[in-house]
Image (cartoon, rainbow, N blue to C red):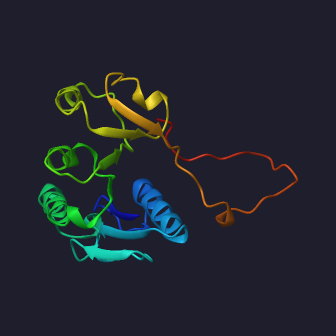
Amino acid sequence: MKIAQISPLFESVPPKLYGGTERVVSILTEGLIRNGHEVTLFASGDSKTSAQLVPICREALRLSNIKDPCAEHLLQLAMVYDRADEFDLIHSHADYFTFPFAQKSATPTVTTLHGRLDMPELQGIHRYYLSHPLISISDSQRAPFPFANWVGTVHHGLLMEQYRFYPEPGKYLAFLGRIA
């Protein structure tokens, strides 16, 4: 398949600093390529990928002097959907910003929602775009929008080769993250 991946522009793919979503986009993109898919990644210019990279901005927005990230993200979506007919699938990680673009496109789009959904101000946009296919990162993440078009749950994964297994128990377990 020819797949477009839309990453947030706040961090590079993979991120140099924090960037959970961008890390997941990197793992998914590289996995799709290993499985024979042709992937185009729309991300910041300092991203490192085996995919065809379409840089939207020179560097991750968190590291730049950009005051309004919405302009760059809207430019990114315009660039993706100008080329939509080149892809079999568009996979967005850009939250609800994708919805109006996807609604006007014949190319199927799915959006993975990586963040919190329990904010009342999100109800309106999710009700307006009821038919847009969504992927959750946990079943509990779906609770605020039981009416949404959930097509699956894909839990964020880890590259196990980045972690060393110790068969003997240590004195503690440390966890840094968010359970959504």
Q: Camera-side residue: 104 or 156? A: 104
**Quarter location, residue 89:** bottom left
Look at 23% across and 70% down and name the residue there.
64
**Vertical comparison of 111 with 164: above or below:** above
**Vertical comparison of 7 with 52: above or below:** above
Q: Visible in this render: residue 6?
A: no
**Quarter location, residue 45:** bottom left
**Vertical comparison of 13 with 124: above or below:** below
Q: Camera-side residue: 2 or 67? A: 2
Look at 45% across and 68% down and name the residue there.
37
Look at 17% across and 60% down and name the residue there.
81
Look at 11% across and 59% down and name the residue there.
71
**Is residue 113 shown left or right of residue 160?**
left
Report x, y in % for residue 6: 30, 60
What number of labels is visible? Answer: 0
Q: Visible in this render: residue 125?
A: yes
**Quarter location, residue 159:** bottom right
Q: Quadrant of the N terminus?
A: bottom left
Residue lying farthest to the right in this orientation: 168
**Is residue 131 shown left or right of residue 11?**
left
Report x, y in % for residue 109: 29, 49
Report x, y in % for residue 74: 14, 57
**Is residue 135 shown left or right of residue 62?**
right
**Is residue 167 shown left or right of residue 11?**
right
